[in-house]
Amino acid sequence: MEKFLEKYPHSSRINVAWGEMDALQHVNNVVYFRYFETARIDYFDRIYPLGAMYAKGVGPVISENQARYKRPVTFPDTLLVGVSISDVRDDRFTLHYEVFSERQQALTTTGSSVAVMFDFNSGTKARLPSELRLLLEQDLR
């Protein structure tokens, strides 16, 4: 766990809920995308709160999600979800996720999302704000 916390000093801590388990008695595969979303929003709250940007009608939207399940997770457990950044371009960037189980003391899941900047007023792609781009580039993997 110490290596994980060194790699992701601002990871998100998420408690597994009983209702997130499925008929096979482990956390359902779809739930991990909610975990990724929680960690992604926490990440942005730390580096660049998105509220003001969304108020202007522009913000990142997820165009692609991927997950790889390495170990099943069950209730009760607490997960640490780390976020890192790669592939920063003019209109998009990639987020990577790693999920660590405190109960198992092991990495259980990895994943990624491609976020594309979108102008909600015009319904078209937009450029990354320069301030956000600089912050993302500082966190490149």
Image: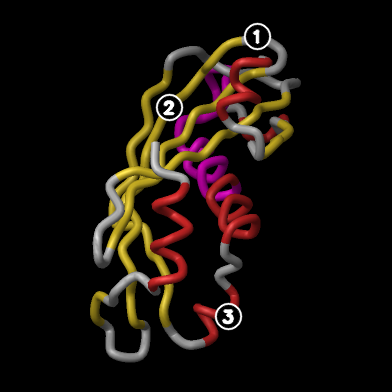
Q: Position of residue 86 (x, y in %)?
A: 34, 43
SS label for mark 1: loop
As measured in the structure, the alpha-carbon distance from the residue carrying label 2 to the one carrying label 3 is: 30 Å
- Circle 3 residues within 10 Å: few <14, some 14–19, many ≥20: few
Magenta part of the protein: which range? 22-38
Which of the 4 quarters of the picture holds residue 90? bottom left
Q: Position of residue 134 (x, y in %)?
A: 42, 61
Which of the 4 quarters of the picture holds residue 79? top right
Magenta includes 5?
A: no
Relative depth, front residue between 115 and 33? 115
Q: Which residue is mark 2?
A: 110
Q: Is residue 67 above or below residue 63?
A: above
- Circle 2 residues within 10 Å: few <14, some 14–19, many ≥20: some
Type of the residue with mark 1 = Gln
**Mark 3 vs 1, N-terminal side:** 3
Q: Which residue is mark 3?
A: 52
Q: Please name the residue shown 48% across and 88% down the image.
A: 56
Type of the residue with mark 3 = Ala
Q: Nearer the viewer, mark 3 or mark 1?
A: 3
As measured in the structure, the alpha-carbon distance from the residue carrying label 3 to the one carrying label 1 is: 39 Å
SS label for mark 2: strand
Relative depth, front residue between 129 and 109? 129
Q: Which residue is mark 1?
A: 104
Magenta includes 28?
A: yes
**Mark 2 vs 1, N-terminal side:** 1
